[in-house]
Structure formats: C-alpha cells, structure tokens
Image (cartoon, grey):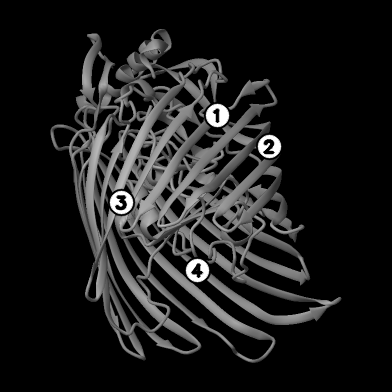
C-alpha cells in the first residue's frame, strides 16, 4: 500500500534535514504546580505510611485540572524526573529518568491493562486524563509490587470506577475544555450514587482535536526537501469512552466490578495519510476485607481482563496492520497485623501476581511475531518503625515464559517457534529518618532483574514508525541493575525543599542500538538497530521547592524545579539515546480570594550528549501563564480556568523524541485553553 510504503523514505528525509539544520530547532512546557498534593500515597505504599522511601509525585484536585493534557505523557511532562516520548501530540508515553517502554509500568488503579504502547513510539496509551481523579508516580525501581519491568518507575492512574466506600446520596463532576494549539474540544463527566450497602459509578469522556499548530518550521518532505509549515501534519484525533461500576460496601470492606472502554482514532505524524483506529475494553473485579482480627488483618484482590486492538489504516481505507493484545492480570495481597519487635512495630504485606498476554501483529508492519507471555510472582514487603526511624525490606521472585509462534504460513521472517523462560529476582531495602525538625532523610537501595520483553527477544523486521530494521536476540539475558536513591527534605509550614540523587549501575541493560549497517528491504535500504545487552550507568539529581513570600489575605509562593541526568553505554563509552537534558523551572503562584494565577519560565539546556547516529537538540526558554476563578453555589463548587502555554510561540523540539520523528513533530506552539469544572 503506497501510503505506508513511503514512510521510511520520509523518515530518512527527516533525519537528513535534522542532521544538517540544527539551527531550525529551538520549546514548550506545561504549567507548574506546587510539589505534592494532599493525601497519602497509595502506589507502592500498601501499609498507608505517611511517607515513603521511594521518590514520588502525586497530582489530584485543582492541581490536576490545571495541568491536565490530552495524554498522560503531556500531563506529567516537566515534573521532577519525568518527560515524555512525544511521537506527536497523540502518542505521548511518560518517561521516568530517561526510561520508557517496558521499563515504565503504566497502571490503572494498580492493575495492568494490556496495550501495545511499549512496542512502538506511535502507539498511544489508552488512558484519558479527563476522567482520572488522581495520578501517582514512583520514580526508580518499583518492581517489588508491580512486576520486574518497572525498573524505571510506575505511573498509576486512579479513579473510583469501583467504589471502595459508601456514597451518601449522589455526587458528580463535569469538565468542559476548549482551545489550545490543537483546538481541543473536550468534555468529561462522573456521576456516583448509592446508600449504606451499594455504591454506583458512571463516567464518560469525549475529546476531539485538529492538527496541532506550531511555530513555522521546515518540514522534511519526500521529493521536495524542506517545506514551510505551521502545523504537525496528520496529528488530529478523536477519543471517547467511559465506564460503569458498582460495589457492595460495608464498614470493613467492599466487593465490586467495573466495565470500561476507550476508543481513539488519531493520525500518525510520520505519514500524512495513515491513521490508527484503537480500542481497549476492560473488565475489573476488586475487593477488600479489613480488620479480620487474626494474624492476617486484611485481604485484598483484583482481577483485570483486557481486550486491546488497534489497526493502522492507509489513505485508501485499507487496513495495513492489526495489533491485538488480550489477557489478564490477577493480584492477591494479605496484610498481617502489627507485631512488637525490638521496641518498635513491624507491619507487612505479602501476595502473588499473575499476568497472561496473547499478542499478535498481522500485516505490513508486523516486525514481531505473535507471542504469548505467562508470568507468575510472589512478593513480600515488611516495614519496621522505631521512633524516628522507619526501615522497609521487600523482595519479589517470579517466573516468566515468553513463546514465539514463529513464521506465519508462507513466510520466513521470524524462523521456527521458540520459547524462553526467566526467573527474575528483585529486592529492596529503604529507610526514612526524621532528623532535627524540620529535616527528613530517606534512602532506597534496590537490586532488580527484568525479563526481556517479547520484542527484545523476537523482533526481526522493518519498523515503519521509526524507519529502522529492528532485530531482537532470542538468546537475550535478563536485565540486571543496582539502584540507589537518596533524598533530603525540609518542610516548614507551606515552605518545602527536596533534594534527591540517584545512581543506577546495570551489568546488563537492553538497549536498541544502531549497528552501522544498512538492510535492504522492499522500501529500500534502512539502518539496522539491534536490541543488545550492554553495561550501563545512569545517574542524576532532582530538586524541587516552594517558598511562601506573602501569607495574608493575598498569597504568593515562589516555586522551582531542577533535574539533570547522564546515561552511558559503558561498552562503547557512548551516551544512551533520548535522554532528557538539564531542565530548570522557576515560577510564582498567587491567590486573592477566589482568584488564582500562575506564571513560569521553563529552560531546557541543549542536549548535545547523544549517540553518533543522533544530532543535538538546542536549548530553549519558554513562558507559561494560567489563571483560575473558584465558583461557589448551593450544593457544589466550580473552577473556571484559562491557560496560555508557550506565550512567545517559540519553535521547540523534544530531545527524548526518536531522532527520525523529531524534525517532523515540533512541540506545541502558543495555545490558549479555557475550561470549566463543576463538582456537586
């Protein structure tokens, strides 16, 4: 089909233009929020401790409303240690400390929905932030509770689709949004009702966008070279979906289920007439029983079944490739009562998790075979508290079996059926110590093993989204690494300062690296990239702070964030690809009665520490503004907001975008977004 066959040539044109025109690149950011949010961290914190040793972020309430983007990646981009893969505005997966794909665990209410977003940069995450009530992020290895793949971290989108407590009467919320550089039209609504014994939830969302407006830039185009444009071609989208859920609730627990669906039709920015039609249907059953009175004080469980499909469609309407992923995730967890130990108290949880996935890819872009993945693991986490000291110790051991079906009839691409098995082991020890008030020190040391993914083992073909021939290694060894996190925190009233550092040493890190060879394909010669295990080191620092300079009827806070990291392939003394540059954000938040306003300046340094096959991304400085007004009415409240991003309309490119797509998809230009959220 011509619409897909031309893509590698256009991507090579993009690479050529990018390599010889770095002066064309200049950026975009998001409105800053005050660090943290009210409430106790849920993700990675089954014992509901007030503080955790692992670095974390949490967004909820008005902070989430004002920061909410069209994707999870856009919503979280700019938080300390967080960036996004940015394959245009629609396929925008979160990255944590330069890690993405299978190393970042995307969760929905701590469950694992199946999709194909880790397989390819042009595959979207099927979670819409419009109906998410809270987002929690764990930075660094989080494999103990959520699987060995979470070496980079965990992103957990939390909602109340399965109510966990009684709902007194009826409550709800609705949000309308319009504007921005993609002329977004969006709406979402949540309604909940119930009584003492039953609780019901329903939600729905719809979001439609046009092609993204950007500052004028030179777009690489086959047969023409560079052409001027102020839009990202083929970046429009149409998303919709919703859920219904119900629970039986009582004083000591709940049992419920939800059924939800997500649909998305969006363009792929690497090709002008290829669109993706994607859906995810998901059934979840969850429950918990507390205060059991014996050694086991609480039991909880969740089962999630996913049915995912997306089809890549050419301009003629013909389906070029169909991706499917079906399977389930089961998690059972028990909490034991607190035990007196050496003058302190010991609390803990233990449990098991199983994951099953059947994946298939059929058509022109099938660069991986159909596979089945079966995983089973047991885990335990203990927490000992003695005065101002809190220590935690956890471990996880699992078994992973990944089978390739090999070649389809009449083809010789993937070879015969193959099978690999792995037994990954992970362990972590952490501590929190309250120093002289108001200082607190935390540390976390983890050893992690990650089984290779099916594409790291069995890929063998032209990946049209990246314009590269990608080759897995069926003999791939497990990924192994040691990670150390340190954080010092000072908090006094509304004032806060956090300084953190991390260091990761991998004896085997599976990276997609250029071989320097070209492979002849039906589309012509393309560069070869192999999934290769190499020794690697990643380290960096993260800072964030808030200082209240005015605290009266008018409030003024100064806020700031800084993160910087380095990542090196020790085998070839080469930088690892797509690592975010140093980023600094300074801003001010003010409020006066129902009015609030925010302003920030975002600076990203030039990223010139790149592999030999990539090119530097220049530095940028941008300005973002926002204002809001709180509404009050009988039985509810509302929030009117206005947001202006990239006020100066500066041309910007993302250093963490794959190099072949970076010159095709600048970051958004100036955009004015208005919205209204009402809750009752």
The one of 298 and 677 positioned closer to us in this rendering: 677
Circle 4 is placed at which residue position?
Answer: 330
Whole-number angstrom distance, CA of label 1 to CA of label 2:
26 Å
Do we see residue 552 in this rendering? yes
**Residue 309: horizontal and vertical position, in percent?**
30, 51
Circle 3 is placed at which residue position?
Answer: 309
**Residue 667: horizontal and vertical position, in percent?**
34, 29
Closer to the chain start, of discs 3 and 1, is 3
Whole-number angstrom distance, CA of label 3 to CA of label 1:
37 Å
Q: Quadrant of residue 562?
A: top right
- Disc 1 or disc 2, which is closer to the eye? 1
Q: Report helix, strand or loop for mark 1.
A: loop
Q: Report helix, strand or loop for mark 3.
A: strand
- Disc 3 or disc 1, which is closer to the eye? 1
Q: Residue most toward the front?
A: 552
Kindly identify the residue that appears in the image at 53 percent across and 58 percent down: 374
**In this rendering, would 136 be left or right of 179?**
right
Q: Report helix, strand or loop for mark 4.
A: strand
Closer to the chain start, of discs 3 and 2, is 3
Circle 2 is placed at which residue position?
Answer: 508
């Amino acid at each position: 089909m011509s619409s897909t066959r031309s893509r590698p040539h256009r991507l090579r044109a993009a690479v050529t233009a990018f390599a010889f025109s770095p002066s064309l690149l200049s950026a975009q950011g998001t409105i800053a929020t005050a660090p943290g949010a009210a409430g106790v961290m849920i993700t990675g914190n089954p014992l509901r401790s007030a503080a955790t040793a692992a670095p974390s972020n949490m967004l909820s309430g008005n902070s989430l409303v004002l920061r909410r983007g069209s994707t999870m990646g856009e919503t979280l981009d700019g938080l300390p240690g967080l960036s996004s893969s940015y394959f245009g505005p629609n396929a925008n997966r979160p990255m944590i400390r330069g890690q993405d794909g299978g190393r970042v665990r995307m969760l929905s209410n701590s469950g694992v929905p199946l999709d194909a977003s880790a397989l390819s940069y042009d595959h979207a995450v099927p979670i819409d932030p419009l109906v998410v009530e809270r987002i929690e992020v764990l930075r660094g290895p989080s494999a103990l509770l959520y699987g060995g793949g979470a070496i980079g971290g965990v992103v957990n989108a939390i909602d109340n689709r399965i109510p966990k407590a009684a709902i007194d009467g009826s409550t709800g919320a609705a949000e309308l949004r319009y504007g921005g550089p993609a002329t977004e039209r969006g709406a979402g609504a949540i309604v909940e009702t119930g009584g003492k014994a039953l609780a019901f939830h329903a939600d729905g969302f719809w979001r439609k966008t046009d092609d993204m407006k950007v500052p004028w830039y030179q777009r690489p185009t086959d047969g023409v070279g560079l052409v001027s444009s102020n839009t990202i071609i083929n970046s429009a989208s149409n998303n919709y979906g919703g859920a219904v859920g119900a629970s039986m609730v009582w004083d000591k627990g709940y049992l419920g289920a939800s059924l939800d669906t997500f649909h998305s039709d969006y363009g792929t920015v690497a090709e002008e007439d290829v669109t993706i039609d994607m859906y995810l249907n998901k059934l979840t059953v969850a429950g918990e029983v507390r205060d059991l009175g014996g050694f086991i004080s609480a039991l909880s469980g969740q089962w999630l079944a996913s049915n995912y499909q997306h089809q890549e469609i050419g301009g003629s309407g013909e389906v070029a490739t169909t991706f499917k992923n079906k399977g389930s995730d089961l998690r059972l967890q028990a909490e034991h009562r607190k035990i007196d130990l050496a003058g302190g108290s010991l609390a803990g949880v233990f449990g098991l998790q199983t994951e099953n996935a059947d994946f298939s890819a059929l058509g022109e872009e099938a660069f991986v075979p159909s596979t089945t993945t079966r995983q089973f693991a047991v885990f335990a986490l203990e927490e000992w508290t003695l005065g101002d000291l809190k220590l935690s110790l956890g471990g996880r051991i699992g078994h992973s079996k990944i089978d390739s079906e090999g070649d389809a009839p009449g083809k010789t691409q993937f070879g015969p059926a193959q099978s690999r098995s792995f037994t990954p082991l992970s362990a972590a020890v952490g501590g929190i110590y309250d120093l002289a008030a108001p200082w607190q020190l935390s540390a976390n040391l983890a050893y992690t093993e990650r089984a290779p993914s099916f594409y790291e083992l069995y890929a063998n073909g032209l990946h049209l989204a990246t314009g590269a021939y990608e080759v897995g290694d069926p003999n791939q060894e497990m990924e192994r690494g040691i990670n150390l996190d340190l954080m010092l925190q000072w908090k006094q009233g509304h004032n806060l300062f956090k300084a953190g550092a991390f260091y990761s040493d991998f004896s085997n890190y599976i990276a997609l690296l250029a071989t320097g060879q070209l492979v002849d394909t039906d589309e012509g010669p393309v560069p070869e990239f192999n999934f290769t295990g190499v020794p690697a080191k990643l380290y960096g620092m993260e800072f964030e702070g808030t200082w209240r300079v005015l605290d009266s009827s008018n409030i003024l806070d100064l806020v700031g964030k800084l993160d910087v990291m380095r990542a090196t392939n020790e085998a070839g003394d080469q930088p690892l690809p797509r690592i975010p540059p140093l980023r600094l954000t300074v801003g001010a938040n003010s409020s006066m009665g129902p009015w609030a306003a925010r302003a920030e300046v975002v600076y990203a340094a030039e990223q010139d520490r790149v592999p030999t096959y990539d090119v530097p991304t220049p530095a940028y400085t941008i300005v973002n503004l926002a204002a809001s007004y709180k509404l009050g009415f009988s039985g509810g409240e509302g929030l009117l907001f206005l947001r202006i991003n990239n006020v100066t309309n500066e041309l910007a490119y993302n250093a963490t975008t794959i190099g072949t797509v970076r010159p095709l998809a600048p970051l958004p230009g100036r955009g004015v977004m208005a919205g209204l959220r009402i809750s009752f």
